[in-house]
Amino acid sequence: MVSTNKATVIAKEIETARCKGNWQAIPELARRYKKHNPNDIVLEQTILAEANLDNIIQSNRTESKKEFAQDSPNSINLTARVDPGLMKSVQQQLTVAMGDKGSTSEIQLHKQVKFLFKNKQ
């Protein structure tokens, strides 16, 4: 729950950055948001996890746009899978955001994916 007017303004800035894919701005926005709303770790950790995820994907992307130029509804090229080991930090951030420490890793992962997509809407 947003507790101050400044936190509300920063939350809107966060949504704008997310919509525009401006992931470089997220760490500073998260810091400012937490400063004005210290009890809301859910939004802070979720956006940091999203920014981290984007960074991992961009850093490990080996495909070029040329590889997808011939895609059609009947034939598409898929991007290379990111090493699951690189996702541990994202999973940890989402676990903190959800406050969920007692579940198995498979249950946590399912909850995290559900949580992440719910917060993107």
Image: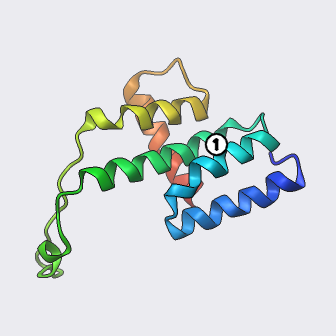
Left or right: 28 in relation to 69: right
Left or right: 59 in relation to 74: right
Image: 68 above or below 53: below
Quarter of the image with the N terminus is: top right
Q: Position of residue 84 (x, y in %)?
A: 26, 37
Nearer to me, 59 or 57: 59
> Residue 108 sits in which quadrant?
top left
Quarter of the image with the C terminus is: bottom right
Q: Residue furthest top?
A: 102
Under circle 1, the secondary element is helix
Residue at 22 percent across and 40 percent down: it is: 83
Q: Position of residue 6 (x, y in %)?
A: 84, 54
> Residue 34 sits in which quadrant?
top right
> Residue 78 sits in which quadrant?
bottom left
Nearer to me, 113 or 83: 83
Nearer to me, 58 or 75: 58
Q: Which residue is mark 1?
A: 44
Q: Position of residue 21 (x, y in %)?
A: 49, 65
Dot 1 crowding, Cα within 10 Å, few <14, some 14–19, many 20+ = many
Residue at 59 percent across and 39 percent down: it is: 45
Residue at 51 percent across and 56 percent down: it is: 24
Total numbered labels: 1
Image: 11 above or below 111: below
Q: Position of residue 56 (x, y in %)?
A: 34, 47
Q: Residue furthest right?
A: 4
Amino acid type shown at disc 1: Glu
